[in-house]
């Protein structure tokens, strides 16, 4: 891959804003919204990003049920290849029925049982 990490889920807007601040980007699979409206989700991202002083851009790919979010600062933009690779990964994971793990599981391999 060309600078694309293994996918994982993060639901906290503040954590997502910090990742965007650091130059990472978000590829939201719309089925992961659950009961949240896409516009409400975008508003949550916007508000969290104001707190860390960044402006974000949203690219809705409605036919693919994906929204890509990135830091609008020119030095933080993902490359076109990285975006395309991320979208291909989402399509592959959907085809295989793979649900990305949580951030904790993805980074540590630790699964917390309730």
Image (cartoon, rainbow, N blue to C red):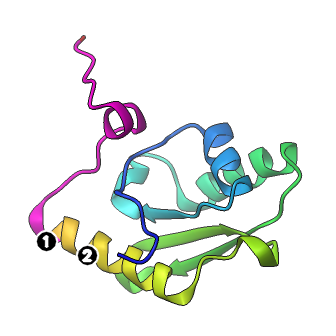
Q: Is residue 84 above or below residue 13?
A: below
Task: Indicate yes or no whether the magenta region holds residue 99.
Answer: yes
| Residue that badge 2 annotates | 91
The residue that appears at 50% across and 48% down in the rendered structure is 36
| Quarter of the image with the C terminus in it | top left
Side of 79 relative to 77 (left or right): left
| Residue that badge 1 annotates | 95
Residue 4: percent from left, percent from top: 43, 68
Q: Residues within 10 Å of mark 1 (few under 14, many from 20)?
A: few
Q: Residue furthest front?
A: 2
- Mark 2: secondary structure: helix
Q: Residues in magenta?
A: 95-113
Residue 95: percent from left, percent from top: 13, 71
| Quarter of the image with the N terminus in it | bottom left
Real-space CA distance between mark 1 and mark 2, rounded to the nearest whole angstrom:
6 Å
Q: Is residue 2 above or below residue 99?
A: below
The residue that appears at 39% across and 31% down in the rendered structure is 104
Side of 83 relative to 59 (left or right): left
Residue 112: percent from left, percent from top: 27, 17
Q: Residue furthest right?
A: 53
Image quadrant assignment for residue 113: top left
Task: Indicate yes or no whether the magenta region holds residue 105.
Answer: yes
């Amino acid at each position: 891959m060309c600078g694309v990490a293994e996918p994982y889920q993060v639901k906290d807007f503040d954590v997502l804003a910090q990742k965007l601040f650091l130059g990472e980007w978000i590829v939201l699979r719309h089925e992961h919204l659950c009961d949240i409206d896409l516009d409400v989700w975008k508003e949550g991202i916007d508000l969290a990003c104001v707190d860390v002083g960044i402006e974000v851009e949203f690219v809705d790919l409605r036919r693919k049920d994906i929204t890509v979010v990135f830091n609008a600062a020119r030095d933080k933009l993902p490359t076109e290849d990285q975006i395309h690779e991320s979208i291909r990964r989402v399509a592959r994971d959907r085809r295989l029925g793979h649900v990305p793990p949580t951030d904790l599981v993805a980074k540590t391999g630790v699964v917390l049982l309730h």
